[in-house]
Image: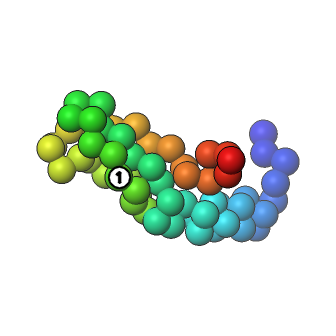
Amino acid sequence: MSHLTPEELAEWQRVLDAANYNNIFCHCRQCDREWVASTEAPCTCGSIRVEYIACWQFPDD
């Protein structure tokens, strides 16, 4: 059960999408390549074994 109205949920998703734009850290578990992107996508090596972490989740230290 959501505590947000449909409008609040849509706004929350919009803000999250904006925070992730050019801000998703990607790490290929097959070839160990790392890159930053806006969306989740397979690695250039063809692997779909990719870990995705929103960069804004990392501390600024």
Horizontal side of residue 55 vs 14, given as left or right: left
Residue at 39% x, 59% y is 37
Which part of the image, by quadrant, shows the N terminus? top right
- Please provide percent x and percent y for residue 29: 30, 31
Residue density around tag 1, few if under 14, some if 14–19, many if 20 or more, within 10 Å: few
Q: Is residue 10 visible?
A: no
- Please provide percent x and percent y for residue 3: 84, 48
Residue at 71% x, 61% y is 12
Residue at 23% x, 31% y is 30
Where 14 falls versus 41 (above or below)?
A: below
Closest to the observer, 1 or 25:
25
Colour scheme of the rendered structure: rainbow
Q: Amino acid at mark 1?
A: Trp
Closest to the observer, 35 or 4:
35
Horizontal side of residue 43 vs 24, given as left or right: left
Q: Is residue 18 visible?
A: yes
Q: Which residue is mark 1?
A: 35
Q: Secondary structure at mark 1?
A: strand
Closest to the observer, 34 or 9:
34
Where 45 falls versus 30 (above or below)?
A: below
Residue lying farthest to the front in this orientation: 61
Residue lying farthest to the left in this orientation: 45
Horizontal side of residue 44 vs 3, given as left or right: left
- Please provide percent x and percent y for residue 31: 21, 35
- Please provide percent x and percent y for residue 48: 26, 38
Q: How many numbered markers are drawn?
A: 1
Residue at 81% x, 54% y is 4
